[in-house]
């Protein structure tokens, strides 16, 4: 979806305000150039305070004035948090999890497949859309919000799961064989005897249930999209705010949603990106979230939520709000939307602060946003709809994430930590990467990095094999191609069906102990948690283990194969070892990397005028200088540079270069 | 309540003894001068082994002999631990908590508002009191024991809670608005739809429920007091053993009880004080607990429980038992009662040892108590009923404690840790402090310290304003006057309604990161967890942040206002920074502080003879010497000192000075 | 039970295989000399996929071929993991624990006393045994597997427990008195009012319930043995694989089983031993497990499970598999059985790897086992049925383990850590020890070590007294003889009834703080967690506390008494202090210890030819040399040594010496 302006705004909750102030708020927004709000997704109980009693006044008040103040509006359907009366009327709506039924109170705590829930969601969405659909300020709709399945495992949803298994495995013996159900007396004699899946110790079954829950989310969003499409007007879009995984901030792939599949029903992908700030601001989470979002619709995306003040430790230093805004654009976003406009005076997220502090007066954060918008407006048409043509991709996979998680008890490995180690290595060396899924075509990339693809069916393995045969350069890490699509370990040498491509195989692995990683050039790095003992056959050995007993095994191998090459990293090594290997393969693949690296970060793309746009960011306290390699000028300042000129990027600042 | 002797004794459980030995025990008590026991509160199942079957023999045996041996007795009503048959007869008595219903077995695990429970409590108390009330050895009654609400949240008590809300907010829209219930779809359309409060994520609602539970305790004790008053004889008192909060020992304000309000039905306040010992004995917990207890009835108090041997790490060094005993008296206690006489041979508290070890033979602890009683008896009339006239007070508040706790997830702050940091700073510099509650008159104090008064209604804020206007000197810390009585954050600049008094305001706060605290005299201190970014207007700035970006903000401010002054500490700084600020304000307030500090601790008061009594304690291994500032003599040794004499206080020892 | 060959093999699960391969597996086994498999215990649902539908094909396939390939088979009864249909048919089978009812899915999660469970166990065992009993390859039966009670506490089993109490204490007042039930109102007026034991805070009651659960296991195994005995043929044995306690590997005494009593129904004891490997391989767990197993039947035993590859960190270094195999034999095992043959491709223990890796191809581990079997076969008749005549024993006790555990909250002490500290001290100095139980005769030992015998009835105390009187040398540690058989602390000086024997007594204990342990020879050691303050009367003081206040007390005492001696260790001291004391007493007892110690470990015994066999192991990276003290030769290499020769044991290697 191409846009004609960059959307800058915030979530807006008229319902939460301690006193009536829409006009005041909209005047403040207009004053600094905010042009969009996102509303209505959190407060079903406000729109329907009693069963069947609807009152959209607080919403239509906002829409009336938004039209008047020329503020665009994205409407969220209010299904992610239910009213208390609904939980009282249909107690079985609340999710029955492995730890028991969830109480009413929080959000995303119910079974999204429950038919009573669906009845009421359908009704409230239609009532809302009938009421508001013709307000011209509405530009799009968001379905639900950060959708979750709430680990629901009540009788009805479990019955649906068993039906889905039965459809895949009409003969129960095939199911038992594939899932290894004989183990610990778990064999199921007939489908009617299927036990409650919540107690299972079978990782294949547990993972299949998690996949089923992801499918439920895909189906739920698709169902909502169909409802909403009955009401939307031409030019309006449908989106969802997907969110990455979370470790106190956005980190890694979302385990509970298959965003690629769930995004099929959308017009444009949306994403939440919350990231470390102050001294810890690196731009890496912004780039990671951006790559996640681009991978959904293979296009530009909307940042639907990001922090302005946010949590205690995120209060931005002067200049950082501006730097973050440009960072989103440089990764392909067409919006910067803060959560939220004000700071909430009651309840749970009181200290997740918005653009305005609790005083509701314009302050530091408000002013800094205004300042960067003033600077941005004259050049926005050169920055929006940025097109990426990255030469490297990273293959990500929900099934493998689940597989690694199921066996974390055995080795302490975490899929997202491995993924981030790979992604961050690329980010820091200014190798821009896309994310691809198994179902995507990755033949166009010069370099394909495959971290911990634990679950891999033979189709995928053959695609990877073809990729290499046809000239692609592959880097695969430990724990890849080890198990099939139901997490059954392949009963042959690992990596399954690729040992010829790699020219090595292994069937033993252990903890590193004192084993460090020793490269052929003498450089040495540490390992942690896990090493595989690779037996090279006809490959080059780039690194071995430095260890009294494991030195006979390879740790990192490289092999020319077909028209391409296949490199394998058999150990959970230091991030600098990852960098070294990726850099070496990139060179073989003919990818040019700049001479500078983090904290100087480079992002490039092509704009609507087919100009090459090159962002250079400085994520540090110190000024940074690079040498210009061609005639170009800075879009912001207008300064011109010739080849060989020094370009200085001040602390927490950037330049945006356009070829002259 | 004034007494005519100091009560020294122990809890006594005839019911727990492995064999019959009351006479033997009472002879041992008399031999070293113990004069009081506390009995009967723990063993309802002994008094009523089956429903309606009563047997007080084990109690009357004790009372008979207590009269004979002239040992005074405090009777506890046995309501804090119920018999098994009662839990079986009325299963709904057991508390239904957010984590499910509590099992039978422990104490304080039931709903004290349950009507079946009340029926049986009423019956057993009346049966007991009718049986024993005329034993002349009885000097008083204790209601229940360390009363708790057991986090009860079953249907009946929740219905009562909703009724109480409805009484406060007859219009449900007012309730929704005040509590911000629209948030996450929690709005309640009608009172009948009020969802189970156990799942709420609304901090205002959660805090209101905790306050309601405190009110239940106040009501319960008042109800018991009325029953007991029907039976007591002239001269007998009613008390309760309140306990501070707990971190392995007594620490901070009790979150679950409003002791000030719950104490209204009592004649004299009682308290439990358990404290670190051996190398970690400082006297601070004894002083803290004493101040808590004095604040309840604004008078002397009874230490109803303290350790003799207690837990493993508390076995006292030689001399410490004596030091601890005098410490209690120096803070205004009229009793020293140990828990308990013997060491228990079965069950849970086997290793919470008493005066006698499990051998039940006189040992070290018994002997050391005897030794200090011999010394104390000749001077006890000079030490009891000690009256305090402290010039400084600390404002404590259950609502603010709850408020800070509700948002601990956001900033890691803990009310009691902040309170102790303030209290201990005063203690260590020998600034004796009282505790005051919002409802108290604090106009008489020269210095008022207000730590983290997160929840503050406008009445309280105006009282504080008036205090300063009328000449009081105020020190307030961060996180004060931020939210109203229902934890709704005030929608204006902080500290609410006091920005003129302080001459500064703020609306941003963050983690300190590298920001240290830099005073105007160049001294520097560390911060932790939380800093506010103060914008000084017409105040003095005593300290700023040393930081690349936050140095523009103030950290500690001071302002003359009206006839007094208002100082503000905007950061969770090191205890030495607190000391520095308090010392500076004390000087402005005209409070004289001695030149020595911890481990030399000074406590003063006036006795029944209107003599000024000055205790000087040495809580350390090393002898300590101070210079005498007036003619005086030591009550214990009789030694006389002139001005300029050195007074040496040996290791773990004390002197008690009286003006000559 | 004497054997005529050493059993070397593995658990074998035809049911788990990803494809049909029994022949292939048996050929691989035969090729390297494996001669035994253990089968069938884990997969009831395979044998009975639907209620009453039996199918033993996967088992009989194995038995047919085992006969053909001359592989011996141990049959496990399949009762430790139930089919899903059984949990659905009788939901009350699943264990109701203090934390609620367990879900179906794992193993050992049901109530083994449940009558429906027993009905179905009885039926499936009989069906299985009728089907297979005449296969001549079967050499024995294993009852259940690592039997557990699953902390079952549902109504039926609790009723049985109350019945058992009532049988022991016909008068409920005796029960109340013995258990101290008055405490916290827990007195039980009549048996009908006995509350749910799951909530109890009474350690005596809680411990009695744990003992009752151990008795249930004893009864359950005995019941199964009777069934199996109806079917077994002459020469076949019945065993059980008992397992030690677990801290990620085998460690200490099993709390949930009284192995001594449960073993009464067996012909031969079996045990699981899993141990640290790689740099952490010491042989101590192998020796500990061996001593546990020998103590059950006072004879040789079978290692039914041990690791080949096992967990990630256990992948053996070259040579370690061989070293481990000989270590088992040196402690008296007649078997080395790995868990398991292959590595599992699905479910839970996917990364608990077997002899074959997931590739199911012969690899490193397979080859290393083959190599040591080749070496072992020629000498096996000299190594099997090794008889031990140890001069020292350690008294172990489930009741005391439970007692220490119940009060861990008070002192942090852990029975198994204390036991291991004592055992390891002996192990490291090459003092071979047996384990004895209270009911055993320990008069034959020169040295008896009694660690933390917290629970000790007067019978046992008198046995210990007699042991010393009659010339035994006793070392007892802190926390011994403190409480009776129901954990009621003795109401007299400690150690109860032995103060005359020790010539000391105590009634106080505390944390060590800075108190170190100072021996009479000036050597000093650290303490942790717990010290007793011993008051010597007529004993020698071997060590005191170095401390400003506790130096007046003894820490370690020694006393000649009767014809023997009694030493007491009053503190949880460093392992080197334990070694020093044990070495000193061993010398007094006339036990000769070799001059070398760990990593050189010596194990001795007598074989079927009445030869003295002496193993010398080197558990380290470095070669080790000792001086030969007599003419002897190495069974493995045939090398002869004369007195004074150096015998060098290479890294991770051994010699087996036989007197010439």
Image (spheres, coloured by chain):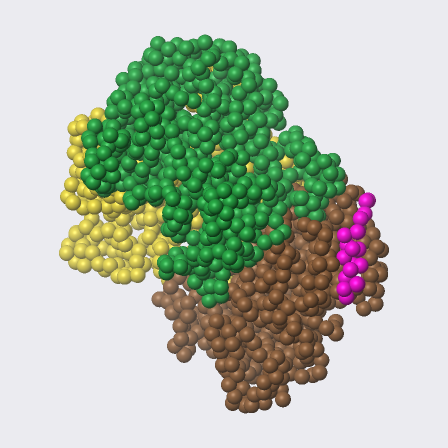
Chain colours: A green, B yellow, C brown
Q: Residue at x 42, y 14 (%)?
A: A138
As drawn, C403 above or below A36:
below
Principal SS element in the magenta part? helix
- Residue A16: in sight, yes or no? no
User: Relative to A8, is B643 on the left or the right?
Assistant: left
Reply above or below: C355 against A608.
below
Q: Quadrant of the C terminus of chain C?
A: bottom right
Q: Is residue C335 left or right of residue B563?
A: right
C409 versus B436 height, above or below: below
Give the extent of the magenta segment.
Answer: C52-70
| Residue nearest the viewer, comparing C580 with C389 | C389
Query: On the image, which quarter does residue B568 sit in?
Result: top left
Is residue C275 rendered magenta in the image? no
Q: Could you say which is closer to the camera, residue B260 or residue B577?
A: B577
The location of residue B221, given as percent across then percent down, is 49, 34
Quadrant (top left/top right/bottom left/bottom right) for the N terminus of chain C: bottom right
Is C56 colored magenta in this rendering?
yes
Residue B605 spot, x, y in % from top left:
27, 45
Relative image position of residue A287 (x, y in whole percent): 38, 36
User: Which residue occupies the foreground of this view, C220 or B458?
Assistant: C220
Identify the residue at horizontal 35%, vertical 9% (top origin). A68
Judged left or right of residue A318, residue C240 is right
Image point 47% across, 43% down: which residue?
Answer: A471
**How many callouts does the rendering have?**
0
């Amino acid at each position: 979806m191409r846009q004609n302006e960059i959307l800058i705004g915030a979530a807006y909750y008229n319902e939460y305000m301690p006193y009536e102030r829409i006009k005041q708020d909209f005047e403040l927004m207009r004053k600094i150039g905010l042009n969009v709000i996102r509303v209505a997704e959190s407060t079903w109980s406000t729109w329907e305070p009693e069963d069947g009693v609807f009152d959209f006044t607080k919403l239509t008040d906002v829409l009336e004035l938004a039209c008047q103040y020329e503020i665009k509006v994205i409407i969220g359907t209010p299904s992610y948090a239910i009213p208390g009366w609904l939980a009282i009327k249909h107690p079985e709506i609340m999710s029955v999890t492995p730890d028991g039924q969830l109480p009413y109170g929080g959000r995303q705590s119910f079974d999204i497949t429950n038919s009573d829930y669906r009845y009421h969601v359908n009704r409230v969405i239609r009532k809302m859309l009938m009421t508001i659909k013709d307000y011209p300020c509405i530009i799009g709709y968001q379905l639900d919000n950060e959708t979750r399945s709430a680990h629901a495992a009540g009788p009805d949803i479990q019955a649906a799961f068993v039906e889905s298994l039965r459809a895949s495995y009409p003969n129960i013996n095939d199911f038992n064989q594939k899932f290894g159900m004989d183990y610990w007396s778990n064999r199921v004699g007939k489908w009617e005897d299927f036990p409650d899946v919540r107690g299972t110790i079978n990782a294949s079954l547990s993972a299949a249930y998690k996949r089923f829950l992801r499918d439920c989310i895909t189906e739920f969003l698709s169902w909502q999209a169909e409802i909403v499409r009955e009401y939307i007007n031409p030019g309006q879009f449908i989106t969802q705010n997907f969110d990455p995984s979370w470790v106190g901030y956005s980190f890694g792939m979302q385990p509970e949603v298959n965003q690629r599949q769930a995004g099929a029903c959308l017009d444009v992908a949306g994403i939440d990106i919350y990231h470390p700030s102050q001294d810890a601001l690196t731009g890496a989470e912004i780039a990671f979230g951006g790559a996640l979002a681009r991978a959904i619709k293979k296009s530009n995306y909307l940042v639907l939520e990001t922090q302005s003040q946010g949590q205690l430790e995120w209060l931005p230093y002067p200049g950082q709000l501006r730097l973050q805004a440009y960072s989103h654009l440089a990764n392909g976003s067409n919006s910067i939307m803060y959560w939220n406009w004000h700071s909430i005076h009651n309840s749970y997220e009181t200290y997740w602060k918005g653009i305005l502090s609790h005083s509701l007066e314009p302050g530091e954060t408000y002013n800094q946003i205004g300042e960067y918008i003033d600077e941005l407006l004259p050049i926005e048409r050169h920055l929006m709809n940025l097109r990426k043509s990255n030469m490297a991709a990273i293959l990500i996979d929900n099934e493998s994430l689940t597989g690694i998680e199921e066996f974390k008890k055995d080795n302490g490995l975490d899929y997202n930590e491995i993924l981030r180690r790979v992604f961050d290595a690329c980010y820091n060396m200014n190798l821009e990467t896309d994310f691809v899924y198994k179902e995507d075509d990755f033949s166009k990339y010069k370099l394909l990095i495959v971290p911990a693809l634990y679950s891999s069916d033979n189709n995928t393995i053959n695609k990877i094999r073809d990729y290499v045969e046809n000239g692609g350069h592959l880097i695969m890490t430990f724990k890849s191609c080890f198990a099939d699509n139901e997490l059954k370990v392949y009963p042959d040498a690992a990596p399954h069906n690729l040992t010829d491509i790699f020219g090595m195989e292994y069937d033993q692995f252990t903890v590193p102990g004192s084993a460090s990683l020793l490269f052929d050039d003498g450089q040495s790095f540490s390992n942690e948690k896990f090493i595989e003992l690779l037996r090279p056959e006809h490959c080059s050995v780039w690194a071995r283990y430095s260890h009294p007993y494991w030195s006979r095994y390879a740790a990192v191998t490289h092999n020319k194969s077909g028209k391409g090459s296949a490199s394998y990293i058999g150990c959970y090594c230091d991030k600098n070892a990852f960098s070294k290997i990726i850099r070496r393969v990139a060179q073989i693949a003919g990818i040019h990397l700049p001479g500078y690296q983090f904290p100087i970060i480079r992002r490039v793309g092509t704009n609507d005028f087919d100009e090459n746009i090159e962002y250079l960011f400085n994520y540090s306290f110190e000024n940074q200088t690079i040498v210009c390699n061609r005639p170009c000028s800075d879009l912001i300042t207008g300064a011109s540079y010739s080849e060989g000129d020094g370009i200085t990027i001040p602390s927490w600042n950037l330049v945006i270069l356009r070829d002259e």
